[in-house]
Amino acid sequence: MNTFFEKELNGVLKIAGITMEDITFGTEDETTEEIFECPLCYDDVPMEESTKLGCSHRFCNNCWQQYVELTITEGQSRNMKCMGFKCNESVDELVIVKLIKNKKLRAKYERNIVESYIEDNKNVKWCSSTPPCGSWYVNTHRY
């Protein structure tokens, strides 16, 4: 320790055989990429290429995307659940939309969400025109 104070930093580095240029200091611009191992596919991906739900289950976005797109294709858009074993956490709609890359599949998902809203809501009804127009309305009649 006395050598440091007597010789200062450059003197100590000279004794050690290194220069200031040999030393790298962390900077604010430096990005240390945190790696995440997906528990489904075991791929190592950067943390920002994974998604974690409120239940704390995290999977890579590739696995999430495959799961979301398969679930929608199978017609199970409503109340999609986490992929975690026996987890009942619902997948947030914003997460689902972020993961869908196929525009047709995204349109199908959005259509399924609207349809489920109409079917689940007593105050909203499908238009009964013939042929069906696909519109809906708020039922103001009280029975």
Image (cartoon, helix red, strand yellow):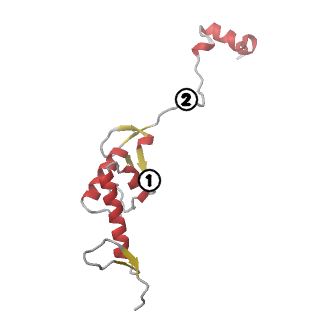
Looking at the picture, how far across and down is residue 111, in whole percent? 33, 64
- The residue at 43%/54% (across/down) is 53
Amino acid tagged 1 = Ser
- The residue at 28%/63% (across/down) is 76
Mark whose residue sits in front, 2 or 1 = 2
Q: Which quarter of the rendering shows the C terminus? A: bottom left
Give the side of residue 50 with respect to residue 40, left or right.
right
Residue 86 can be seen in this image: no
Looking at the picture, how far across and down is residue 31, in whole percent? 52, 32
Residue carrying label 1: 56
Determine whether 86 is above or below 58 in the image.
Answer: below
Looking at the picture, how far across and down is residue 56, in whole percent? 44, 53
Which one is in front, 71 or 22? 71
Residue carrying label 2: 30
Amino acid tagged 2 = Glu
Q: Which quarter of the rendering shows the N terminus? A: top right
Residue 87 can be seen in this image: yes
Which one is in front, 30 or 69? 69
**How many neighbours does mark 2 have within 10 angstroms: few (below 14), some (14-19), or many (20 or more)?**
few
**Quarter of the view holding residue 75:** bottom left
- The residue at 41%/59% (across/down) is 93
Looking at the picture, how far across and down is residue 117, in whole percent? 38, 71
**Quarter of the view holding residue 21:** top right
Q: Distance of mark 2 from mark 1, alpha carbons?
A: 28 Å
